[in-house]
Amino acid sequence: MRTEPTWRIPVGLLGLLVFLAIYGLVIARYVPGMIDGWPTLAQTVVYIALGLAWLLPMRGFLAWMETGRWS
C-alpha cells in the first residue's frame, strides 16, 4: 500500500486530460464527415463505440499511476 504521494498521479491525470482532449477533437473533426450519409441508428452506434473506446487502455494506465507498472 502506497503511503507517500507519487509524481505519477498528477502527471497521469494531466496526460489523461490531454489525451481525452486530443481524442475528442480528432473524433469531432474527422468522424462526422466519414459517417455523414449513414442512417441515424448506425451513427449512434459509432459514437457510442468511440465514446467507450478510450476506456480500453484505462486499466493498465491506472495501474501504472498507482504502482509504476503497466500490469
Image: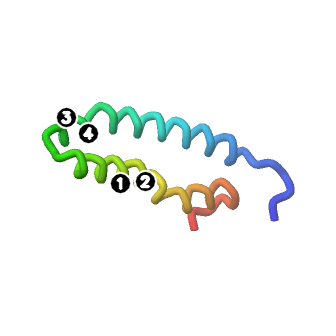
Asked if the residue under mark 4 is in contact with the one under mark 3, i.e. CB atoms within 8 Å, the reply is yes
Assign a secondary structure to mark 4.
helix
Assign a secondary structure to mark 1.
helix
Q: Which amino acid lies under the numbered mark 4 shown in the image of this protein?
A: Val
Q: Earlier in the sequence, mark 2 or mark 3?
A: 3
The disc at residue 49 is: 1
Query: Where in the figure is residue 58, as x and y percent of width and height?
Result: 53, 56
Asked if the residue under mark 1 is in contact with the one under mark 2, i.e. CB atoms within 8 Å, the reply is yes
Q: Residue at x 16, y 45 (%)?
A: 38
Asked if the residue under mark 4 is in contact with the one under mark 2, i.e. CB atoms within 8 Å, the reply is no
Q: Earlier in the sequence, mark 1 or mark 3?
A: 3
Q: Callout 4: few (<14), some (14-19), or many (20+) C-alpha neighbours within 10 Å?
A: some
For the residues labelled 2 and 4, the Cα–Cα distance comes to 15 Å
For the residues labelled 3 and 4, the Cα–Cα distance comes to 5 Å
The disc at residue 33 is: 3
The image quarter containing residue 69 is bottom right
Q: Residue at x 17, y 47 (%)?
A: 39
For the residues labelled 1 and 4, the Cα–Cα distance comes to 12 Å
Q: Which residue is mark 2?
A: 52
8 shown above or below 17: below
Assign a secondary structure to mark 2.
helix
Q: Which residue is mark 4?
A: 31
Q: Callout 2: few (<14), some (14-19), or many (20+) C-alpha neighbours within 10 Å?
A: few
Q: Which amino acid lies under the numbered mark 2 shown in the image of this protein?
A: Leu
For the residues labelled 1 and 3, the Cα–Cα distance comes to 17 Å
Pick out the residue farthest to the bottom: 71
Total numbered labels: 4
61 shown above or below 15: below
Query: Where in the figure is residue 13, as x and y percent of width and height?
Result: 62, 42
Q: Which amino acid lies under the numbered mark 1 shown in the image of this protein?
A: Ala
53 shown above or below 13: below
Query: Where in the figure is residue 68, as x and y percent of width and height?
Result: 65, 58
